[in-house]
Amino acid sequence: MLADAAHVLRFGDGEGETTTPIKAEQLLVPRRHDDRADDLWTVWNVVQENAVKGGLRGIGRDDLGRPRRMQSRAVNGINQDIKLNKALWLIGKKMAALKAAR
């Protein structure tokens, strides 16, 4: 759920539609061996890092339907960075509250 929400936040348009070949599952792949834990905050850190730093690869199609390699870019704008991090933080906090309520 966290990766799906982050995917829409990062790559979605105004209606929440995503057309990028980057998949939500790619946000869950840790960049370091130490990030291979499955607790909420470690997974949150992995998703946040992948969403902000970019470098995720995918194969899309150009206007003529030919395969085209692409790579996600890093978030460089301070406004977009703050907006994305605040939204991810709220999602993580709500997920922690739901888990604690169980």
Image: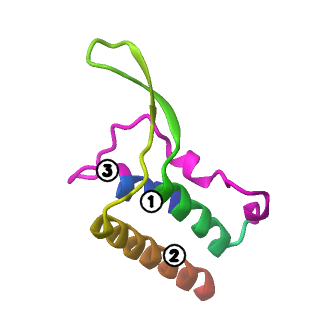
Start-end of magenta stretch: 11-37
Q: Label 1 amino acid?
A: Ala
For the residue labelled by badge 1, is the local secondary structure a helix, a strand or a loop? helix
Rendering coords of residue 78 (x, y %) = 32, 69
Question: Spatial distance from mark 1 to mark 2, Cα to Cα?
Answer: 10 Å
66 in relation to 95, above or below = above
| Residue identified by numbered label 3 | 12
Question: Spatial distance from mark 1 to mark 3, Cα to Cα?
Answer: 9 Å
Q: Label 2 amino acid?
A: Gly
Q: Label 3 amino acid?
A: Gly
Q: Quadrant of residue 102?
A: bottom right
Sort mark 2 into few (<14), some (14-19) or many (20+) by Cα contacts within 10 Å.
Answer: some
Q: Is residue 70 left or right of residue 14?
A: right
| Residue identified by numbered label 2 | 92
Q: Is residue 55 left or right of residue 102?
A: left
18 in relation to 47, above or below = above
For the residue labelled by badge 3, is the local secondary structure a helix, a strand or a loop? loop
